[in-house]
Image (tube, rainbow, N blue to C red):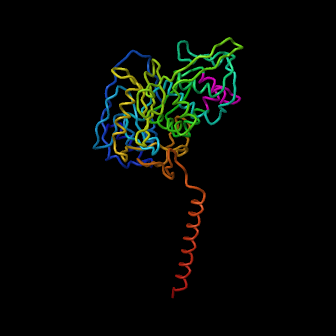
């Protein structure tokens, strides 16, 4: 383990974060990433050692972490990545899982996690000039100013063709009276609720902005929340859709296609999201199911050498599916599990188990359910009963004293 990783582990242990399972992993440097011409990288926030150990102290390393005794993961040219089980939350391995990076369009998954529960997919809304105010040359689905579209159509434009104007429209619609700024604020609130403490959104689309960061671990938390939503799964797995005509604007209907090649070329693919900017480089999230097991992969800062981003993700998914089902180097925290300190706060998260499913939750299919109210009542009754028994025994002991 690197010196930086060891310091993070020590700090995490001092703050009550579990360091169990450290001996069951192997660590090492991440593969080198080719140098490219790119804008200067923004300075990330000061790393909080406790936040770097969220999900298990073994994840605090800036290098590679994988289960001991298994085949080494493929060497992908990405600055960071992570593979996790969507159902159990087990983290199977990663490279710099808590290293700060810029997200590009995978940011749209956070927008989906925040806004899908808020917006009625059947509502018809009007696209504004402000929605179309995007960076020239950036990805757009082709929505028309003044056009009237169902919210569902805008979601498809967002997830299939990464429309930045679709992102603006959805953030504005979900931002209440504050519009788009309110939507971005809601995204950051959702990130903290999910435990994605290293994520800060500045734009809803993932277009670069000052102070905008995420991590491979945080992306996995966000993706897990998205894939728990049936509407997201349906939109994200759609291969093609039609943007309807706008007769009043003399705009014809046209087809759009999903740009995530994993859906077409990887057996069992569930969906995901692609991303790219000159600053972020290639970013990718992909999910697939095999033999009843659902895995997700996240990559940041990838370079295309001999494989595109989705192909690098596919190689890591293959590696994850080949691991034993109980293999783990950490876990994804569940929504609401962590305290929600403000960005930059040094408040440490509560103690976290290093591996296994979310504590207090029961696996049911593709979901985690809390025990029902009867379980809580039974526990309360047991506690009351034990207290009463202790009181009776104490009274008997008093009467027996000489």
Q: Residue at x 32, y 37 (%)?
A: 3
Asked if the stretch drawn in magenta spans residue 236, the answer is: no
Front residue (pair 60, 124): 124
Quadrant of the rendered image containing residue 66: top left
Determine if residue 94 is in view: yes
Number of residue marks? 0
Asked if the stretch drawn in magenta spans residue 184, the answer is: yes
Residue 371: give x, y in percent of width and height.
Answer: 55, 55
Residue 133: give x, y in percent of width and height.
Answer: 61, 16
Q: In this picture, is 55 found above or below 75?
A: below
Q: In this picture, is 106 found above or below 13?
A: above
Q: Main secondary structure of the magenta part?
A: helix
Front residue (pair 270, 397): 270
Quadrant of the rendered image containing residue 279: top left
23 lies left or right of 124: left
Determine if residue 203 is in view: no
- Magenta segment: 166-185
248 lies left or right of 268: right
Residue 359: give x, y in percent of width and height.
Answer: 48, 51
Residue 402: give x, y in percent of width and height.
Answer: 51, 88
Image quadrant in which the N terminus is located: top left
Front residue (pair 179, 250): 250
Q: Residue at x 37, y 46 (%)?
A: 325
Q: Residue at x 58, y 73 (%)?
A: 388
């Amino acid at each position: 383990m690197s010196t930086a990783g060891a310091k993070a582990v020590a700090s995490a242990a001092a703050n009550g974060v579990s360091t169990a399972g450290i001996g069951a992993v192997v660590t090492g440097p991440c593969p080198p990433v080719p140098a490219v011409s790119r804008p200067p990288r923004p300075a990330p926030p000061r790393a909080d050692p406790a936040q770097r150990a969220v999900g298990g102290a073994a994840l605090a390393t800036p290098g590679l972490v994988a289960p001991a005794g298994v085949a080494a993961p493929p060497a992908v040219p990405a600055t960071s990545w992570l593979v996790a089980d969507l159902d159990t939350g087990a983290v199977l391995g990663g490279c710099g899982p808590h290293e700060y990076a810029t997200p590009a369009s995978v940011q749209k998954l956070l927008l989906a996690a925040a806004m899908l529960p808020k917006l009625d997919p059947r509502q018809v809304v009007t696209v504004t000039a402000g929605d179309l105010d995007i960076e020239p040359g950036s990805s757009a689905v082709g929505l028309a100013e003044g056009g009237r579209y169902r919210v569902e159509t805008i979601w498809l434009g967002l997830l299939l063709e990464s429309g930045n104007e679709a992102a603006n429209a959805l953030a504005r619609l979900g931002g209440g009276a504050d519009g788009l700024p309110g939507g971005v604020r809601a995204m950051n609130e959702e990130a903290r609720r999910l435990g994605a403490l290293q994520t800060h959104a500045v734009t809803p689309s993932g277009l670069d902005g000052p102070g905008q960061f995420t991590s491979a671990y945080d992306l996995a938390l966000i993706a897990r929340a998205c894939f728990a939503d049936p509407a997201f799964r349906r939109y994200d797995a759609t291969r093609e859709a039609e943007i309807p005509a706008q007769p009043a604007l003399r705009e014809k209907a046209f087809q759009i296609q999903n740009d995530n090649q994993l859906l077409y070329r990887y057996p069992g693919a569930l969906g995901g999201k692609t991303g790219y900017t000159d600053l972020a480089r290639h970013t990718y999230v992909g999910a697939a199911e095999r033999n009843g097991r659902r895995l997700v992969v996240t990559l940041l800062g990838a370079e295309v050498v001999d494989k595109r981003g989705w192909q690098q993700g596919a190689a890591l998914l293959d590696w994850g599916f080949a691991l034993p089902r109980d293999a783990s180097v950490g876990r994804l925290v569940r929504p609401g599990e962590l305290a929600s300190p403000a960005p930059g706060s040094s408040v440490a998260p509560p103690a976290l188990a290093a591996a296994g499913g979310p504590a207090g939750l029961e696996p049911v299919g593709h979901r985690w359910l809390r025990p029902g109210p009867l379980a809580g009542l039974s526990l309360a009754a047991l506690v009351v009963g034990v207290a009463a028994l202790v009181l009776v025994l104490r009274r008997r002991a008093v009467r027996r004293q000489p």
